[in-house]
């Protein structure tokens, strides 16, 4: 990696000032919300604020950020302190491991240890923000913290960090561009590989290899599984693959991602092995026109609602109704799928105003009774014009054979 | 897939009687715990009881099992009802979707819908079990259910289903064997691919391709990311890869998995590009002897504590201390990493008695200051003798170049 070394051994994708800026932005929101200490459970948010990058979140871990100190505190399993040593910019005292005696037993819980650590620092009073609806912040985590911090008021700070993440810095945009290049490469491999008689799992293998291998200049990071249902299964959005062989006439919806430094660019296209069925054929130009119209509308100062309305107008003119949103803010991702930042959605009623360097995945996904279609782009809102799209694959349905 | 079709369109890896047996086993535990309705959030447990197999768990979803009815109820996002239609054995009325108006908004929550569905069925009274410490069952999920089900007593049923999963049926063992064959293939690819000058990401790509492609007879399913830290990073257990090139003398700890029908066989080996350093060289025979001793002890009727003690005796005789457990029950997995069933651990004080067809991942993982070593096997406890190991890769350190 052409990455910077912040301390002995640690290799991070960004320089220390980048992380300190993120922390300052989060602290401003904490002050506005009256939060003295913020407890962060979402692995994406942990990565954002500390660099921590290990797939260790199947055990409980936490980043604590107090207004009164400069750097966050990372708390995790003792053996994972080494992971934090190699991937965060945090110094020795800000890395704390709980012993193995908390692992694999029902009657002790890692959040007891977290509460004790907070007490030791005097962070057990005032208002403590917790991510009440973050993945991996379980109901029991909350109970243990409440019991272990009787002098604190626990308040909901779900998405507080996510709303900071929505506007990317120039180094983050650089990673998104690399992710987009990887997604483009992987999609080209998918389109080439899908052939009558080939097993779906072998195409999935080729997609993974392209995604993880990345380009000659930079490698790819751990991806989500591609979604790639075929045939009538294209009616369902979130299926992976089988080991069936592709059949003549079958359509496949490929929704994949490129990942660089955990930044994700998603990309969806439909590939058909033969002439498209009439219903699908009629839908294609509508989806393309609708996506183009909404993309063209996605400019700084416009609301998410208005962007979606541009698609909706094209769809309605063609008698098509789609109840689900057409996109969402995208950035750092960790599996179980989380490339969606869970903040702004391109959907009716979302009044979020687009700002430069917000990044979105816009997807026209149509899942009907026994068929479906997908077309998407990941893009950046620019200062003064049309969005910057991160992958360059023709915006069409790919008909083969 | 050579799989059975349970209803129109749905393709499941197992026959209906297999699922009904699982449900009966879970209901017995519900009765013993005085639980009338069990609400299941863990994606592995959902898959176990219904077949549901989609990477849609980034939005809230739930399986409800009531003592009074035969089949479970699946509740998820409206667009994912199609995923359930293709992957579960459940019939129309037992698949319920919540509308898109619950998505991407902070003031509505899918658990409100779940509570209403339970009310409609009269399941809003008595004792309702929830998985308080399951991934994806957030603190907010609990609050919404508590508020939406005022006449019910919510009780903790964490791991209730997991403890049923610990003993596998013959069809599950068949899937574990296939997973083991895939893991074996992927490890051989890893050992072959790691060479001085090759990028780590390109080896990761080869591992993914082997894992997902599977064998000529059966494909592989969505895997976890392999862990494969190199050089001094081998001191950390849960790191993936970089795009650095392998250097002469460098060690790599490869911990990967094969996955079939979501059943996971994990496998770890260390590969060194040159002569091992003295500390590592001294450790290797101890780890091998210790693993062999513990594996030999892993027989029906023996406790987890005793299995670990067999390793501990070998380690102590060689002056080695390892504070972390040497294994855990393994089976169905979904990313964020969860192949660990979170029930029995091979560690001091765990009194679980090994039974035939329990499956474990036993791993001698040593993570020191600036080096590390891993050696593992996934195995089945047999009726009357030594365990059945699922992958067949020589139990040694691989020294290359």
Image (cartoon, coloured by chain):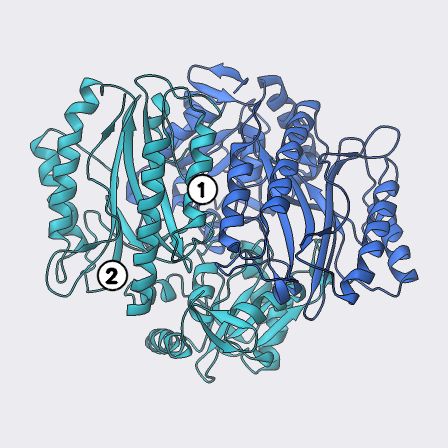
Chain colours: A blue, B cyan
Total marks shown come to: 2
Whole-angstrom CA distance, mark 1 to mark 2, is 27 Å
Percent of width and height locating residue A167:
73, 33
Residue B26 in the image: above or below residue B308: below
Label 1 and label 2 in one chain: yes
Would residue A270 be found to the left or right of residue A314 on screen? left
Q: Of helix, strand and loop, which one carries label 2?
A: loop
Residue B380 in the image: above or below residue A152: below
Q: Of helix, strand and loop, which one carries label 1?
A: helix
Instruction: Check disc 2 and report the residue beneath it.
Output: B358
- Picture disc at residue B208: 1
Label 1 chain ID: B
Percent of width and height locating residue A272:
68, 56
Comparing B397 with A192, the one in front is A192
Would residue B341 be found to the left or right of residue B334 on screen? left
Residue A149 in the image: above or below residue A231: above
Label 2 chain ID: B
Q: In which quarter of the image is residue B342?
A: bottom left
Percent of width and height locating residue A371:
69, 66
- Residue B31 visible in the snapshot: yes
Percent of width and height locating residue A228:
59, 54
- Residue A308 visible in the snapshot: no
């Amino acid at each position: 990696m052409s990455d910077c070394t912040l301390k002995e051994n640690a290799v991070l994708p960004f320089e220390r000032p980048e992380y300190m800026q993120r922390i300052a932005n989060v602290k401003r929101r904490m002050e506005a919300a009256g939060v003295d200490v913020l407890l962060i459970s979402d692995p994406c948010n942990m990565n954002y604020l500390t660099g921590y990058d290990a797939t260790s979140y199947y055990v409980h871990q936490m980043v604590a950020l107090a207004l009164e100190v400069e750097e966050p505190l990372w708390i995790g399993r003792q053996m994972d302190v080494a992971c934090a040593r190699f991937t965060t910019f945090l110094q020795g005292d800000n890395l704390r491991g709980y012993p193995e005696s908390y692992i694999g037993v029902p009657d002790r819980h890692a959040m007891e240890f977290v509460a004790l650590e907070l007490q030791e620092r005097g962070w057990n009073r005032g208002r403590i923000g917790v991510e009440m609806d973050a993945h991996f912040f379980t109901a029991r985590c909350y109970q243990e913290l409440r019991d272990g911090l009787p002098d604190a008021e626990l308040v909901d700070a779900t998405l507080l960090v996510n709303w900071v993440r929505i506007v990317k810095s120039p180094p983050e945009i650089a990673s998104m561009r690399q992710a987009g290049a990887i997604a483009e490469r992987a999609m080209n491999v998918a389109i080439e590989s899908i052939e009558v008689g080939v097993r779906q799992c072998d195409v999935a293998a080729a997609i993974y290899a392209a995604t993880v291998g990345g380009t000659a200049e930079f490698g790819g990071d751990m991806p989500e599984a591609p979604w790639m249902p075929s045939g009538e299964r294209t009616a369902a959005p979130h299926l992976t693959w089988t080991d069936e062989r592709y059949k003549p006439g079958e359509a496949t919806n490929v929704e994949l991602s490129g990942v660089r430094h955990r930044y994700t660019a998603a990309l969806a296209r439909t590939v058909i092995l033969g002439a498209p069925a009439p219903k699908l054929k009629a839908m294609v130009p509508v989806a393309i026109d609708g996506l183009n119209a909404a993309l063209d509308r996605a400019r700084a100062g416009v609301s998410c609602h208005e962007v979606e309305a541009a698609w909706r107008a094209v769809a309605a003119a063609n008698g098509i109704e789609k109840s689900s949103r057409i996109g969402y803010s995208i950035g750092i991702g960790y599996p179980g799928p989380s490339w969606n930042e869970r903040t702004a959605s391109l959907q009716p009623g979302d009044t979020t105003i687009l700002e430069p360097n917000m990044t979105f995945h816009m997807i026209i996904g149509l899942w009907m009774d026994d068929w479906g279609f997908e077309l998407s782009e990941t893009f950046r809102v620019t200062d003064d014009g049309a969005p910057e799209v991160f992958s360059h694959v023709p915006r069409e349905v790919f008909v083969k054979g």
